[in-house]
Image (cartoon, helix red, strand yellow):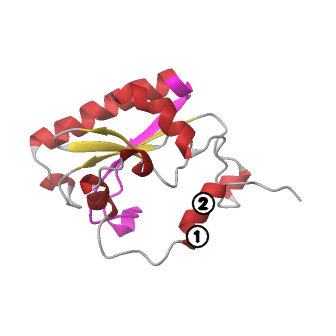
Amino acid sequence: MDHIWSPWRYRYIASPEPKNSCIFCDIKTSEDDVNNLVLYRGDLVFVVLNLFPYTSGHLMIVPNQHTGSFAGLDQETTRDMFELAKRAEVALRQEYHPDGFNIGMNLGKAAGAGIEQHLHLHIVPRWVGDANFVSTIGETRVLPEDLSATYHRLKPYFR
């Protein structure tokens, strides 16, 4: 039998039931950017690595405003989100050389939002063949890099 090791997932498995607070609002008010994997903070938005990524380099752009409605964002916040998405694409291309990207939001539970009350824009680098039998049949993701390594590779692009 083959074994796939992903020790960072233990935090998720062993963590207590989710709090009633919003994880993104908690990150927004925290000053511990390294442990929260915050790559960038702006006046209206911040960039954070996804704790449970689909691929290495999977990051999210999160508005400071607590809302699940894309239409509810003001024009300046929307602009900042998409300007940062462009910056993230450039950083990920330079650092990881992906074959493509998925960029988008899941709004509402029916659309697959894991945190539906606080929208966020996913930037997911993709490579040809990254969705193989392990991810499609086994519902398991294999990441070649620890999140702290990803953080330290991408942080210089967001200074």
- Above or below residue 65? Residue 77 is above
Residue 92, visible in the rendered structure: yes
Residue 66, how many percent across, how many down?
Answer: 20, 60
99 vs 84, left or right, is: right
Query: Against 157, is 73 above or below?
Result: below
Q: Residue at x 18, y 36 (%)?
A: 79
Which residue is at a point 66% across and 41% down the rendered structure image?
144
Q: Does residue 83 appear to the left or right of 52 in the view shown? A: left
**In the displayed structure, does residue 120 sit left or right of residue 94?**
left
Between 72 and 32, the one nearer to me in the picture: 32
Q: Quadrant of residue 147?
A: top right
Q: Position of residue 88 (x, y in %)?
A: 38, 31
Q: Are marks 1 and 2 in contact (CB under 8 Å)?
A: yes
Q: Where is residue 29 in the image (x, y as percent from the top left)?
A: 24, 56
The image's mark for residue 102 is none
**Between 6 and 127, the one nearer to me in the picture:** 6
| Image point (51%, 30%), residue name | 153
Q: Name the residue under label 1.
A: 13
Could you say where residue 70 lies in the image, as x and y percent from the top left? 21, 53
For the residue carrying disc 2, how many other residues have a C-alpha within 10 Å: few (<14), some (14-19), or many (20+)?
Answer: few
Disc 2 marks a residue whose amino acid type is: Arg
Three-letter code for the amino acid on which mark 1 is drawn: Ile
Q: Does the magenta run of residues contain 33?
A: no
**Residue found 14% across the figure and 50% down from its top:** 73
Q: In the orientation shown, which residue stands out farthest toward the top?
A: 94
In the image, the segment drawn in magenta is: 95-122
Residue 9 badge: 2
Furthest toward the right, the residue is 1
Check the picture and name the quadrant holding the N terminus: bottom right
Q: Dot 2 lies on which element?
A: helix
- Cα separation, mark 1 vs mark 2, equals 6 Å
